[in-house]
Amino acid sequence: MSAYSKLKASNVKAIRKTTSRARISSNCKCKEDHKSCGCGRRVDPAVEAMQDAGKELSDIFKQLKDEHKAEKLVRAIRCRDAKAVQSLLDCKCHVVCFFCSRDKDCVRICCAFGRNHDVTVTFDICVKRAQDECRRNFLF
């Protein structure tokens, strides 16, 4: 007799795991963002603002592929010229402060997105200080 025939189905128990997640049920058959059907689901404005932030920041950094614009930004950061940095960025972004970090000059930038500034993104851009062979600071 094999080992398989000795098992009985009555000895097997099924354990069901319960979860605390709430399910949202809707009678809506609309698969889009529910604007057209009038269902009770609303779009969170922060989600739209986050998508806007991604697009805008991508465009800002994409323009830095141009060597002339990248050179202007590096010079503006090293000279701590907020107006020049601001002119290269979108109007939704502003310079918070300039600071130094070891051998780098940095600028902190804050950008706000959405109708009510639902999403803010703050980031730093740091450029290494230019030095000659004698290790003296040198600006181009």
Image (cartoon, rainbow, N blue to C red):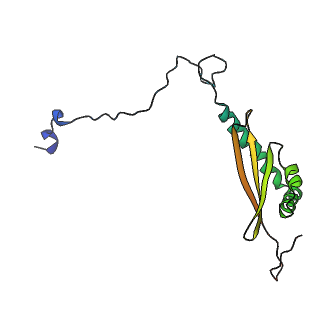
Which residue is farthest left?
Answer: 1
Q: Quadrant of the N terminus?
A: top left
Please state the horizontal and vertical placement of residue 30, each as a whole percent of the image: 59, 20
Asked whether 123 or 13 is in front, the reply is: 123
Q: Quadrant of the C terminus?
A: bottom right
Compared across the picture, whether 52 is left or right of 38 comes to: right
Please state the horizontal and vertical placement of residue 4, each as a whole percent of the image: 17, 41
In the displayed structure, 89 sits above or below 128; it is above
Asked whether 23 or 2 is in front, the reply is: 23
Please state the horizontal and vertical placement of residue 130, each as a whole percent of the image: 82, 72
Residue shown at the point (15%, 35%) measured from the top left: 8
Which residue is farthest bottom?
Answer: 134
Residue shown at the point (85%, 50%) measured from the top left: 86
Please state the horizontal and vertical placement of residue 76, each as a whole percent of the image: 86, 59
Asked whether 27 or 50 is in front, the reply is: 50
In the displayed structure, 6 sits above or below 76; it is above
In the displayed structure, 131 sits above or below 27; it is below
Asked whether 96 or 28 is in front, the reply is: 96
> Quarter-wise, where is residue 50 in the image?
top right
> Quarter-wise, where is residue 69 in the image?
bottom right
